Image: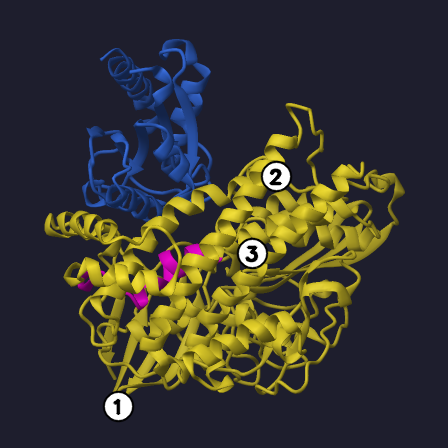
Amino acid sequence: MPPERLLILGLGNLLMGDEGLGIHVARRLAERAEFLPPGVTVEEGGTAGFQLTCFFTHYPTVILTDATLDGQPPGTIQLLQPRFSSEFPRALSTHDIGLKDLVDGLTLLGQMPELYLFAVSINDLQPMHIGLSPEIEAVLPALEAKIITLAHQLVNR
Amino acid sequence: MAQRIVIDPITRIEGHLRIEAEIKNGKVTDVYSSGTMVRGIETIVKGRDPRDVWAFVGRVCGVCTTVHSLASVRAVEDALDIHIPANAELVRNIMFATQYMHDHVVHFYHLHALDWVDVVSALKADPKKTSEIAQSISHWPKSSPGYFSDLQKRLTTFVESGQLGIFANGYWGHPAYKLPPEVNLIGVAHYLEALEWQKEIVKVHTIFGGKNPHPNYLVGGMACSIGIDDASAINAERLALVGQLLRDAETFVQQVYVPDLLAVAPFYLDWGAIGGGLGNFMAYGDLPTNGINDRTQLKFPAGVILDKDLSRVMEVDPRNDDEIREYISRSWYEYSVGDQEGLHPWKGETNIKYSGPKPPYEYLEVEKKYSFLKTPRWKGHAMEVGPLARVLIGYALGREDFKEIVDSTLAKLNVPAAALFSTLGRTAARGLESLLVAQWALEFYDQLISNIRNGDRRMADTSRFDPKNWPKQAQGVGMTEAPRGALAHWIVIEDQKVKNYQMVVPTTWNASPRDHNGKMSAYEASLMDTPIADPHQPVEILRTVHSFDPCLACAVHLYDQEGKHVSKVKVL
């Protein structure tokens, strides 16, 4: 697959502590672009919902990173391939409604990209706090390595 | 026997709106509207450079993006007596129109349609009959039997796999849903087409404002340079794309949005007598064609209508200390002048003092303070703002463009003008004004192209950008019409910094709590007497509240972890 067709998208609210981990990951990957296949796009999706439509329809393959409040120990990383919004982990933080509407809409339109979701369990939202808790900070290197490995696998397949 | 129902949150996207209603004999007999989240941006911008404020306040809401930035730059320009060049006015107007078309279409299909369209019923539609109906109401090309049958198959697969997804929160099968399966299928088809279309129209914002949401504004004009052959400026190719996007938007509004509105409305004419509410309407007006200070040359005229009296439109003056005031007697704030006084926004205060129940709570203490929204009043009157206010004011002033769209719609639906004062009227007004805005957008575009051809490329007046040229003290007001209604920001500048900043936003007018005299605001008044078939599925309340297009993030979801409306019913 040409690397231009792969998008790495971090989601989350930067102002809510661990909830913003997707944004932290996107920023760190953008700084370490030399480890990614040349031509792969890294974007911060923030808390957007419908506004992500153009990204989802432009890129046939998308690697998403987001926080989840699923009750698992903080820092637990799961790789999921959700096909419907109901297959997203529970309470995918605060911005999930727009995103889920978008996923279902695109599925019905037959325009949903191939989606890989790294869902990282967090303990809590911390309103009006920028930065990560030590538990989440500690798993970021492993998470970045997983994303980089998957990106290479997808480009080389 | 009375029952109290709570719907929390009530919007499908932003913000925290809660409605508590009492139901007796199948009707709403009392109702309280509450914003349960603090905004507080006014406090954040105090002490900052007035030229930067647009970037902060723009973030109040990502749905009605641009509107707060526009109000902010206008407030600063008003304070410092800055007059923007004609091209900047045209670009702001084009972005304003883009925002309207995007917001109104997304509201109709994605935030409001499912109150009227039964998705599950669409599975029973006959694709051939659906196609005949679609072709009888519009020239829109995607209307063949095959198109509808393909969509129906995908929808069936989706639903049969147990994936109602986006459609999981509807009260499907509720007796208040009246559309035949074929019209429901058209509604679902256009819900999906609108999802695709909306990603295109916002490109206008990215071309002129660099990004979307939250495009860039500039005190004194717009931060986009025109260079027909310049690869990094607004060049001929980008201008051509803007023209194409605006023409496509006009087609979508004319051939999809408005025909759907007129196809759905005949099945819900009873809603032309429900949800009217206050009968008082206010608009600040917008879309200037001769500078914002020439209030006679606005595409959307300003004014006030009281008690549904369309024979008289009064003037509104946001500078007058006695006209617009905000009260907090039922809101979780305190004023230095006491709880019973109202303050004009130039003297406004944002001192939060929460005195409600400790969350999680079952009910608000509605007899005391119960909202983070203040209660604004015009000369003491509660006002409804929004599309219905704008359309009624244009109509009452006798403007031909407004008369034409309103009279032709009333004739098509065979309803009297009184039906305008209703939930249906509010939803219809939003579609009808979209027709006007779509046409005006192309006028602004043609004028911009003509100016550029004639060699006028000025986009900003920066002669007063340097704070050295400012007076020691200045105050200004920036008015606009957000898609949801009249919006204004008031600024006081002292020693080149923001001394005070107050925003009175549309949803504050509409969704605020009762005032110091116990008088209701627009949401509460409009919900009184609403018939409720089943208190456990209060779709009727959602219809009327959604008809206002609530956006509570800017005014101060109700979904639980499973994404469902939290609605509680208790027998009193």
Q: Is residue A22 above or below residue B195?
A: above
Q: Amino acid at mark 3?
A: Ala
- Residue A127 is situated, as x and y percent measured from the top left of the image, at 43, 45
Q: Which residue is mark 2?
A: B209
CA gap, disc 3 to disc 1?
A: 44 Å
What is the magenta segment's predominant secondary structure? helix
Of tags 3 and 2, the one toward the viewer is 3
CA gap, disc 2 to disc 1?
A: 53 Å
CA gap, disc 3 to disc 2?
A: 20 Å
Of tags 3 and 1, the one toward the viewer is 3
**Disc 3 + disc 1, Cβ < 8 Å:** no
Q: Colour of chain A?
A: blue
Q: Is residue B538 above or below residue B259?
A: below
The chain drawn in yellow is B
Other-residue count near label 3 (Cα within 10 Å), few / some / many at <14 / 14–19 / ≥20: many
The residues colored magenta run B104-122
**Sooner in the amino-acid sequence: mark 3 or mark 1:** 1
